């Protein structure tokens, strides 16, 4: 069994960036075209991979810490997690609850101590252009996670943003989600 695949077929991968903006975290859980080494396989996520999953009626995607369902940060079902796919990747914006977990994650994001982002999914459409190369074309997104240590995708960055920059970033994400961009 592939070490990244669980018995139920769920897979987890790392992403690229996260920013703290007041009581919000925002960034990209996945960046398209960034290669990850999963065992002996080079894997990339293609644009459009999340479109069907994000448009599914009643879909509730979670935001967790280290894929731990006991460490819930937000969810789409309650409106505290917002997700949108753009030309760069899977953008997220989440409201952080005033809990010990939320405060700890915000402090770590502001200090740039977080490892990055990750996501769990079931592959719906994939291509194997070579025996050691996999392209994810469509996935059923289950959750995104803040990763404290080492996400699967290299080059992950975590940074805190000032309120002025956060406001501009939030406006861009709102336009993205409204289909204006």
Image: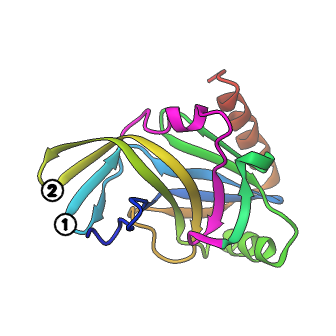
| Residue at image point 65% right, 30% down | 176
Q: Nearer the viewer, residue 148 or 131?
A: 131
Q: How many marks?
A: 2
The crowding category of the residue bearing disc 1, from other C-alpha atoms within 10 Å (few below 14, some 14 to 19, many at least 20), is few
- Viewer-side residue, 60 vs 12: 60
Residue 175: image quadrant is top right
Left/right of residue 11 with respect to residue 163 in the rendered view = left
Residue found farthest to the front: 8
Kindly identify the residue that appears in the image at 48 percent across and 45 percent down.
140
Q: Is residue 6 left or right of residue 18?
A: left
The quadrant the N terminus occupies is bottom left
The residue at 43%/38% (across/down) is 49
- Which quarter of the rendering shows the C terminus? top right
Residue 143 x/y as whole percent = 58, 56
Membership of 48 in magenta stretch:
yes
In the displayed orientation, state which residue is furthest to the left.
Answer: 131
- Could you say where residue 135 lies in the image, as x and y percent from the top left? 28, 44
- Residue 80 vs 168, above or below: the answer is below
Of helix, strand and loop, which one carries label 2? loop
> What's drawn in magenta, residue-wise?
46-69
**In terms of depth relative to the viewer, which is nearer, 26 or 134?**
134
Q: Position of residue 12 (x, y in %)?
A: 44, 62
Q: Which residue is denoted by mark 1 in the rendering?
A: 40
Q: Which residue is mark 2?
A: 132
Q: Is residue 181 above or below residue 101?
A: above
Is there CB contact under 8 Å for labels 2 and 1? yes
The residue at the point 35 percent across, 67 percent down is 4
Residue 112 in the image: x percent, y percent?
62, 71
Q: Quadrant of residue 69?
A: bottom right
What is the CA distance from the residue labelled 2 to the residue labelled 1? Answer: 6 Å
């Amino acid at each position: 069994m592939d070490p990244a695949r669980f018995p139920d077929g769920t897979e987890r991968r790392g992403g690229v960036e996260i920013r703290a903006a007041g009581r919000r975290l925002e960034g990209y859980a996945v960046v398209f075209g960034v290669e990850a080494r999963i065992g002996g396989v080079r894997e990339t996520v293609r644009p459009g991979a999340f479109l069907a999953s994000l448009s599914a009626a009643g879909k509730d995607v979670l935001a967790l810490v280290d894929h731990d369902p006991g460490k819930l940060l937000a969810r789409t079902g309650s409106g505290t997690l917002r997700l949108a796919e753009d030309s760069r990747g899977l953008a997220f914006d989440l409201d952080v609850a005033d809990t010990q977990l939320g405060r700890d994650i915000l402090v770590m994001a502001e200090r740039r101590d977080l490892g990055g982002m990750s996501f769990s999914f079931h592959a719906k459409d994939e291509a194997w252009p070579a025996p050691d190369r996999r392209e994810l074309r469509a996935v059923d997104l289950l959750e995104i996670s803040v990763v404290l240590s080492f996400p699967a995708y290299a080059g992950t960055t975590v940074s805190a943003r000032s309120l002025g920059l956060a406001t501009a970033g939030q406006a861009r994400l709102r336009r993205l989600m409204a289909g204006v961009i």
